[in-house]
Image (spheres, coloured by chain):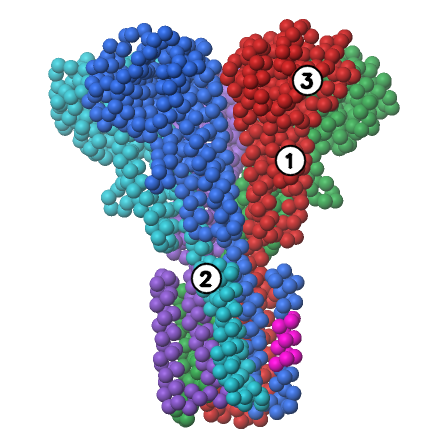
Chain colours: A red, B blue, C cyan, D purple, E green
Amino acid sequence: MKITIIDYDATQFQEKEVKTIDECFPFKEKPTVTWINIDGLHRIDLIEQLGTHFGLHPLVMEDIVNTDQRPKIEDFVTYLFLVLKRLSYSSHDSDVVSEQISLILGPTFLLSFQEAPGDEFDPIRDRIRSSKGRIRQMGVDYLAYTLIDAIIDNYFVLLEQIGDRIEEIEDVLVANPRPETLQTLHTLKREMIVLRKSIWPLREVITRLERWETPLIQQATTIYLRDVYDHTIQVIDAIETYRDMLSGMLDIYLSSVSNRMNEVMKVLTIIATIFIPLTFIVGIYGMNFNMPELQWPWAYPYVFYVVLFVIILVMITYFRRKKWL
Amino acid sequence: MKITIIDYDATQFQEKEVKTIDECFPFKEKPTVTWINIDGLHRIDLIEQLGTHFGLHPLVMEDIVNTDQRPKIEDFVTYLFLVLKRLSYSSHDSDVVSEQISLILGPTFLLSFQEAPGDEFDPIRDRIRSSKGRIRQMGVDYLAYTLIDAIIDNYFVLLEQIGDRIEEIEDVLVANPRPETLQTLHTLKREMIVLRKSIWPLREVITRLERWETPLIQQATTIYLRDVYDHTIQVIDAIETYRDMLSGMLDIYLSSVSNRMNEVMKVLTIIATIFIPLTFIVGIYGMNFNMPELQWPWAYPYVFYVVLFVIILVMITYFRRKKWL
Amino acid sequence: MKITIIDYDATQFQEKEVKTIDECFPFKEKPTVTWINIDGLHRIDLIEQLGTHFGLHPLVMEDIVNTDQRPKIEDFVTYLFLVLKRLSYSSHDSDVVSEQISLILGPTFLLSFQEAPGDEFDPIRDRIRSSKGRIRQMGVDYLAYTLIDAIIDNYFVLLEQIGDRIEEIEDVLVANPRPETLQTLHTLKREMIVLRKSIWPLREVITRLERWETPLIQQATTIYLRDVYDHTIQVIDAIETYRDMLSGMLDIYLSSVSNRMNEVMKVLTIIATIFIPLTFIVGIYGMNFNMPELQWPWAYPYVFYVVLFVIILVMITYFRRKKWL
Amino acid sequence: MKITIIDYDATQFQEKEVKTIDECFPFKEKPTVTWINIDGLHRIDLIEQLGTHFGLHPLVMEDIVNTDQRPKIEDFVTYLFLVLKRLSYSSHDSDVVSEQISLILGPTFLLSFQEAPGDEFDPIRDRIRSSKGRIRQMGVDYLAYTLIDAIIDNYFVLLEQIGDRIEEIEDVLVANPRPETLQTLHTLKREMIVLRKSIWPLREVITRLERWETPLIQQATTIYLRDVYDHTIQVIDAIETYRDMLSGMLDIYLSSVSNRMNEVMKVLTIIATIFIPLTFIVGIYGMNFNMPELQWPWAYPYVFYVVLFVIILVMITYFRRKKWL
Amino acid sequence: MKITIIDYDATQFQEKEVKTIDECFPFKEKPTVTWINIDGLHRIDLIEQLGTHFGLHPLVMEDIVNTDQRPKIEDFVTYLFLVLKRLSYSSHDSDVVSEQISLILGPTFLLSFQEAPGDEFDPIRDRIRSSKGRIRQMGVDYLAYTLIDAIIDNYFVLLEQIGDRIEEIEDVLVANPRPETLQTLHTLKREMIVLRKSIWPLREVITRLERWETPLIQQATTIYLRDVYDHTIQVIDAIETYRDMLSGMLDIYLSSVSNRMNEVMKVLTIIATIFIPLTFIVGIYGMNFNMPELQWPWAYPYVFYVVLFVIILVMITYFRRKKWL
């Protein structure tokens, strides 16, 4: 468990990594903006210490450590509690991984709890350190906005990766559909279900954050939240579009399988309908009857060249007219 | 029918199992928190006695004993009436069983009616007995919350069992799809319908409980109800996710059946298209015509080794190019 | 057309069947509860007479005799107009029949118009006659509630019958799916559409009846209407569940048809792939070439026992490995 | 372009067909009810003249002549503008034709613009002429209601025709499904899409007309509009029901096609599995080996009668047990 | 990047193309209507200069240059910000291309930013130049309306092109369905998804523009916006109709593929069931048994003409009765 504290206002800035929870306490009442970030949630006792000092409700602390929450926002008057999800491709099994990030937005402090360390927030730290942009001029609510924005911007990266995979499969689907393609389609569909579950509730979270009349969010910040809302809608749009595309691709797959079957059946039917009657005809002259035809001088070439080839020709003409050849 | 009474406040506690309904009556007016639990609903006369004494509306008593209600909440000003569902796997036929639990929340008493005895409430009894947590400090509305929470927490256990079964089938589906797999998929889908029916209305029940401005629910308890609401949404999310997954698995099943059919047809087609023309050719030389070829010294090996093997080679090349082999 | 009048209050009761419309008129102003029931709607002139006397709007009278209305409720200030549907299985062609029942709820009178005579209201008449329950103590709005409740209770009977038929088909579906099963599935689905159409609007009708602030409905009665509302939701739930189940059963049917096809194809493929090559081999030795093998002493048993059985064995092994046998 | 003017109140009535637009102008200010009907919309200049005189907004005149509007209502304070659709079967290509009817409802005048002349309004003209019913007593808003009612009543005629066609196809579907049946199903589905598009918005149009508080609609007329609303809902219900039925019929069609395929395959499989092994056996004794069996006196009848018939019997028994015969 | 300025009121008009951003600045405060159009968004620095001078929020400038926004509207009190989409068929790869057009509507100025130059606005420029219509009399909000109207009118052109392609495919589908047809169907479906995504949000944009009470939009203009709203709904209706039609066409395609398979199978089955038994019969008399029949004088014609033709006749009769021929 790693605890980092960043404390700043327009004129001054300090950043430190602390070993004990106690070192965080003095920042609670400081009028400057304080951002305390905790990576790793296994030390439940420490989180409870921190929570108790910052006046968090026991249920909030429970929700922070139970990482299967849906994205949500709750207003506890003196602070806001937000649950968000970081989504990323795990490197080894190419599956979407969902990690929980909880934010506590107080009047002058922001606590962020991450299930696992990530790098989305690094550019924000840089911006604070170098006093780039307006971040050092703004309050703690603007800091919360930048964190949320960073998390949602990260979804676009994930969506792009998924979009690439969908395109890859689409090409394979046209060229050479195989049972494995279906398996991949199925996996992608399931990932979409996971994504939807993590991102749909976000829409309401951001709307509430923007609309709630809480002194914790200043008027100037709501315009930025509206921007975050737009991004959320874009992400949801993309997910719905991908879902529609995957459904369409399943139809393509199924109908291409049935087309191939059709082709196989046609080959069988053509071969069988040409040769089965022919075999019957040659069978006739294999009978041990005393057939007068057998003695005719031109019987063999007649049967062989005329009858058989006429039958083959008729069949082929028939198939051509049926557009099977 | 088993009646147990638990009566407590912050300082004192008593618990007893009573034989007659009359023994419950004195607790109605007592200012301490009283929890009367009734297991088994077949003694309608006793329930009516109890209801009449506690001032319940006849329709409420009807709903308590008719166990096919949907989850619902009703406000009778002096008490709230809640209907909930306990869901569990029956041990002998692996089907989801739904049992009704009705709660009457009065100013100082809570009546709970269970269709069949269950063990979800045992930890709550322990907490009351041992005065663990805040339960002994809180009122009867908090007790109601803990009961509802226990019922909903139990759904997660059920969902996990169903999740395991879905995963099992998923593995079978890839390895060796069989008609029985479809049957199991169908059973799971039907269980999902039952679950949905029991859990969807819960969402509204909890919302109302949280939002209604009734003196029976104290302000401090609503925050706990919001937590219960979150859990309900999680359960509903999980059910919807499972439903989506089961639909996807049905698609996989159907397309894998049609893939297998395709494979069978290919084998048939390959064998038939190779051997039917060959049989025709050997049939030719089985005719009893006076064929000059029969007398040629190398005719037999020529037909046998050259013609036949050339045909087989051509066919195999063709199939390979078509990617059937 | 049969007209029956029941007039009662807590102390007195009279019931009579009248021949002429005029006999109903005196009851309009009587302060006691009057229930006038009309069976059969073909005498439009008489209904118009009655309507004119009781001050009904011409459109109301039109809606009463045109029996293809949807369930609805309308508030005409001095009276409420309700249209409901009686649903039942017709005895001779096992199809759902929908009949219209219209209610006019005035301050002291209730008019009920039935398309065809039914027996759902008989227990209510008995209750009034024998002064059983609270009905004689309550006003005309309570009478209206009991009629609506009787109609909706009747839906459960119908739903049970449909549920039985669905279960029957489900068993057949597993054991021996046939085209007729599909036909029955289709019929059930269509009946569900009819039911939905008749019952969905009821939800709104009851809600309005409960919520509207009309002096015609007393406060004490709304609690009973809430109960009726719950029943309506249960009926709708059941219909939706049946619809879901029927959809699932269609999937089962289709996939079981394609499974059977698969099985048929496997038998064909196995037989054909074993015997077509064998026939080719025996065809070879039916050629009239001068084959040296024919003269070898062990040629026949060699070909017959060794070659053929080896081929059969290889084939069977192959099929077993493919899990076709 | 044909212009007819009907002007009436309770006591007097005049009707005339006019040649020039100018003749309509005096009726604008007349306190009697004036109904000006225009058939044919190709003389845009005349419509503009009329519109300018009656004070219509330029956009309204544009909407009147562009006949691809959706049904809508707009309130221009001094007049209401309604767009409706007449739907009918075209006689020569059995397709649904949608024609636009626009209404301008002023304080004392009603302008109706029809894309093509129709006969739905004839009974209304008769009622005005003969002073039948209440129409001559009522204002111009009641006239507007009767026109709207006539248009919607006409939808029922169309729906009945479509219902008949659906029933016809349903019978064919059971007896002898053919590709053309599918084509007809598809056409009907497309017609349903057209109908929906034309009728769905009507629901909102009528609701607004009923709810808007405009002096142009008198209180007494709203009750009639509620009736029109009910009819609209009935039409929408019918369309939805037909859509559901058509979807169900597509399922029936597809599964009956696959049933027939199944049957064909069974015949092939039965014939092939019986005769292919038999052909192999007779092939054996066609080999030119020196087989000792050939010399046995009872060999031929033994092979022929015993072996072959035993095989046939075994096969038939097998198929019967599989329920293929 | 091309910057053009049009400045006008009822009496005067000027138009010029400027090279530097600075030339736009004097127009900001001028009371006349000023329309500044920027084609090309790659010079972000210039756009920022312009934005800063006209007092635009940094987020607005970001949204203008990031061209993957959804259509939206935002109210910044002193100006409105609109994002719209121009949709067109790209000429070389027949795919729908979406380009962003952003509008800034101030009290006396309108800024329009186009991703790529288009020609929809040319007729508007002509109307301003020639003082045709009311545009020179109206304010800047009317100018904004004409631009929005031009963009939406353009959608109808696109929809017509798509409608033509759908009709083409529909004809092919009936005549000769091929895998490529499916591919085209899939492409069209995907284009519909893109269209929907671009046009659905427009509905809300226009509604807000019409309903918001902002001094930037005059009362007289809202009636024109209502007209634009109607057009938007028409576009959305058309898209939904096309989607429904494409789904229906996929069903047609799939069932026509399975019909063709059926036909192929029937041919195979007919040929095989006629000739396989016949081959068996001629095989019998190819056996080298000492069969007495072989010696009968009429045996050969009997077998040949009678037995075989009887079998063929029976088979054909059977197939005809089954309606396969």
For the residue pair D121 and C194, the one nearer the viewer reads as C194
Residue located beneath label 1 in the image? A89
**A26 left or right of D151 in image:** right
In the image, which is nearer the foreground, mark 3 or mark 2? 3
- The kind of residue tagged 1 is Tyr
- The kind of residue tagged 3 is Thr
Place of residue E313 in the rendered image (x, y in percent of width and height, measured from the top left): 41, 75
Residue located beneath label 3 in the image? A4
For the residue pair B310 and C215, the one nearer the viewer reads as B310
Residue interval drawn in magenta: B304-314
Q: Going from the N terminus, do you reach mark 3 or mark 1 first?
A: 3
- Please identify the quadrant where the N terminus of chain D is shown: top right
In the image, which is nearer the foreground, mark 3 or mark 1? 3
Place of residue E239 in the rendered image (x, y in percent of width and height, measured from the top left): 59, 37
Q: Any mark on residue D45, and which?
A: none
Residue located beneath label 2 in the image? C325
Q: Do marks 3 and 1 share a subunit?
A: yes
- The kind of residue tagged 2 is Leu
Element at badge 3?
A: strand
**Distance of label 3 from label 1 (alpha carbons):** 26 Å
Is residue E174 positioned above or below D190 on the image? below
Element at badge 2?
A: loop
Q: Is B309 colored magenta in this rendering?
A: yes
**D254 left or right of E194 in image:** left
Please give the name of the residue rendered at 54% of the width and 41% of the height, measured from the top-left corner. E244
Is residue A306 positioned above or below D223 on the image? below
